[in-house]
Image: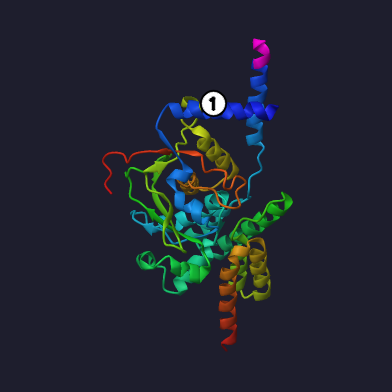
Amino acid sequence: MKKMKLIYLLPLLLILLSACGPEYITKKDAFPNIYEERPLSILVLPPINMTTAADAKEYYATTIAEPLSFAGYYVYPIEVTTDILKNEGLYDTEILGGLPPEKFKQFFGADAVMYIKILKWNTSYYVIGGNVTVAVDCLLKSTMTGRDLWKYDGTIVVDTSGGSSGSGGLAGLIVKVIATAIQTAATDYVPIAKRANIITISSMPYGKYHPTFDKDRDMQIILKKKSEGTPN
Amino acid sequence: MKTSSTIWLMLLSFLFLTACATQKPMYSWGDYSSSLYKLKKDPCEENLMKHKQVLLKIMEDSKENGLRVPPGVYCEYGYILMKEGKSDEALSYYDLEEKTYPESAAFIQRLKSQFNKTTEQP
């Protein structure tokens, strides 16, 4: 009985939320390939650092495994895989970017590989936390077909502003749950990178270890046009 | 009539909210990124010890709360032990990683074969 009422309430809530504000798209429509291939394991490559902050590459890499695991994926231990890549002479991100994704299937058994670019300041896709801006560009590629499975490049973002205006939507709610789950006392830099990662990864379809795996096909994410004045 | 439906709604929304709030987190990562960041910034023995303790704490907390140890944690800990020359202990953590996450098998095999290669050399 209680459940029935909830079932009526939810679509109403959705309609209400999607009626106002930006254009929505379902995860399934945004990233159909990932629902076809259902990758389980992700290899995160050393990020490409395009900023002037020399340590951005290293510090960013310390924060990415957590949110990816919360999205339901197996993430290879970045510390270990980076070391192995270094030993193979593959730490240079330019060389890595040139390798066919299939190589990483052979090498690590990974289903998918994540390419991350840490961008300059003032691009269209930034996340503000305090006085520091962290901007990233992520691309998940299949190691089986080489296809793009998911990406975050500023055209698709989940609005996490949430709260009063109702623009947060369901996705925003989930992001908040994750955010509270991973809150820890940390250095100044880490929480900002973490927040950026949460927002970045929240549009990603859930993996096998997530309780709502495969039930998020119709989850609404915001389709946003690239804002004006993007340098890239 | 009106008040009863309001009460209904309030009850339902309360249920909905509490359902979300009490949802168990999937993993306990502890201070992982913080201690790893410190280690990267200053890779001294002390920071390595601290990071090892954080990794152990993640395993303990996960066990205590009935959670799966987050992906890669067993393996990372094993890798540090391997570097310290504690290979038997290291291999047991590699096995734990593979047992917890069967999809890591190929990768764990690679790590183990690397170890075998280095031990075969005089």
Residue B90 location in percent, x, y?
65, 71
Residue A63 visible (yes or no): no
- Three-letter amino acid code at the position of disc 1: Leu
Magenta segment: B1-5
Q: Which residue is labeled 1 in the image?
A: A12
Viewer-side residue, A137 vs A15 = A15
Q: Which residue reaches farthest bottom?
A: B122
| Secondary structure mainly formed by the magenta segment | helix
Viewer-side residue, A82 vs A157 = A157
Viewer-side residue, B61 vs A215 = A215
Residue A220 location in percent, x, y?
48, 37
Residue at image position (41%, 52%) is A138
Instruction: Answer with the quarter of the image where residue A41 lies.
Output: bottom right
Residue A209 relative to residue A107: left or right: right
Quarter of the image that includes the N terminus of chain B:
top right
Give the structural element (helix, strand or loop) at label 1: helix
Residue A88 visible (yes or no): yes
- Residue A12 vs B37, above or below: the answer is above
